[in-house]
Image (cartoon, grey):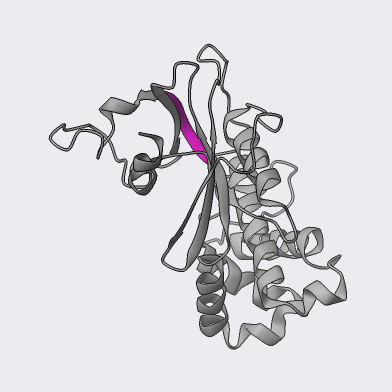
Amino acid sequence: MPVTRSTAPNGEPSRSIDARLHDVLEDLSSRFILNLPEAELASLERVCFQVEQAHWYYEDFVREQDPSFPTMTLKKFSHSLFHVCPLLSHWGNEHEQTFQSFMAYKTRVPVCGAIMLNETWDKCLLVKGWKATSAWSFPKGKINEQEPRSRCAAREVLEETGYDLSDQIKPDDVVELSIRDQSLSLYIVPNVPEDFQFETRTRKEISKIAWFRLTDLPTWRRNKSVPGKFYLITPFIGYVH
């Protein structure tokens, strides 16, 4: 029986998915890892944050252009990148421990955002994650190294909703909580216009942006049943009564 070989559109024999994936990982390591300063390359946390950025780029852009590439969890992607990138190879043999250390560190990085209220203070703005199972939450995100908390809050709100509240943040109007060893700072920002055309600037992070009446939210009325998942906002609701 004759052996047939698949060909690419240009007539050349098509390369295996593993070979093409190896090239993609090499390109991502060049893009996100190889140009890091030596001080950052020595930091597991900084390197892993770059690996996470590379993973997002892979899922959001590489796979969108070529769906034949497999989707990968962050754990599987980092394992693959550690073995392809020479600068990360010393962590490759201890990937499990390295990944767990990073995930533990990641959950302790401070998070900042805003509780955005309308002009009559009876509604708040919430965002919903990309996945169908995602919960509603206040717009927020992890702080960058040496970034002031108020600046982080404004940056994250702008990225997630398209609204610039940098001039409306008052440093003292903030709710600060610690949940599972993670610091969360949400600035209370009233007088946000309801008719603003909110639009996320993220890719595959935010699926919906909507106003909710405060009186319709859990813990405001204990006996009221509200559709949807709101457990991420529950610890903060009492501070805006």
Tell me the quarter of the picture where residue 193 sits.
top right
Q: Is residue 210 left or right of residue 195?
A: left
Query: Which quadrant holds the C terminus?
Result: top left
Q: Which residue corresponds to the image point at 31% horizontal and 46% vertical from the top-left? A: 231
Q: Residue at x 16, y 31 (%)?
A: 224
- Asked whether 206 falls inside the magenta stretch, the response is yes
Q: Kindly give the residue lying farthest to the left in the view shown.
A: 223
Q: Is residue 192 visible?
A: yes
Q: In x, y percent, where is residue 3?
A: 56, 62
Considering the whole magenta stretch, tell me its main secondary structure: strand
Magenta stretch: give its range: 205-210
Q: Position of residue 120 (x, y in %)?
A: 44, 16
* Percent x, y of residue 45: 66, 72
Q: Position of residue 133 (x, y in %)?
A: 33, 44
Image-based side of 195 in relation to 15, left or right:
left
Location of residue 195 with respect to 12 vertically, above or below? above
Height in image: 111 above or below 84?
A: above
- The answer to whether residue 72 shows anywhere in this view is no
